[in-house]
Image (cartoon, helix red, strand yellow):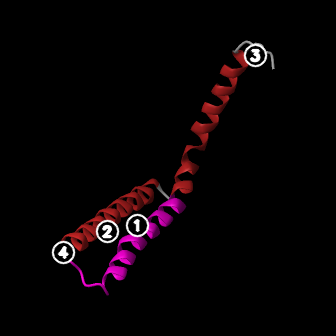
């Protein structure tokens, strides 16, 4: 999965959330019939959930490209931690 696909997935999730928020606002401002309210609730909740699910599968694919940088950062962190002096616990534990 490429970075482009990840950013398109993010844009899709954002547009879906905005569209569903607009639908919820329209349903709140215009009195809807009682029989339609459960359908509106499903249409407001389900699409953002599915977009988030799709986005959750796209995120691990994005991290594949940054493994080299992450390994370098981890090595630098370990060197920094090794350079710190050892001290006793302040409470003597």
Is label 3 in contact with label 1 (beta carbons under 8 Å)?
A: no
Query: What segment is highlighted magenta in the picture?
Result: 31-58
Q: Residue 4 is drawn in which quadrant? A: bottom left
Whether residue 40 appears in magenta in the rendering, the answer is: yes
Label 4, residues with CA under 10 Å away: few <14, some 14-19, many ≥20 = few
Between marks 1 and 4 in the image, the one whose residue lies nearer the viewer = 4
Disc 2 secondary structure class: helix
Secondary element type, mark 4: loop
Q: CA distance from mark 4 to mark 2?
A: 15 Å
Question: Disc 3 marks which residue?
Answer: 91
Residue 88 at what x, y percent from top left?
Answer: 78, 13
Marks 1/2: CA distance? 7 Å
Answer few, some or many: residues within 10 Å of disc 2's Cα (few below 14, many 20 plus, some between 14 and 19). Answer: many
> Tag 2 or tag 1, which sits nearer the N-term?
2
Q: Out of 1 and 52, give the one closest to the viewer.
A: 52
**Residue 10 is one of the magenta-drawn residues:** no
Please name whichever residue, 5 or 28, is drawn nearer the observer in this view of the structure: 28
Residue at 24 percent across and 67 percent down: it is 25
Residue underneath mark 2 = 20
Pointer 1 residue: 48
Disc 1, disc 2: CB below 8 Å?
Answer: yes
Mainly helix, strand or loop, the magenta region? helix
Reply above or below: 72 against 6: above
């Amino acid at each position: 999965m490429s970075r482009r696909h990840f950013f398109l997935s993010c844009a899709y999730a954002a547009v879906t959330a905005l569209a569903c928020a607009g639908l919820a606002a329209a349903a709140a401002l215009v009195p809807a019939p009682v029989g339609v309210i459960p359908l509106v609730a499903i249409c407001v909740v389900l699409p953002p959930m599915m977009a988030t699910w799709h986005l959750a599968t796209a995120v691990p694919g994005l991290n594949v490209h940054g493994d080299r940088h992450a390994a370098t950062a981890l090595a630098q962190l370990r060197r920094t931690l090794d350079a710190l002096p050892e001290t006793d616990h302040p409470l003597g534990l």
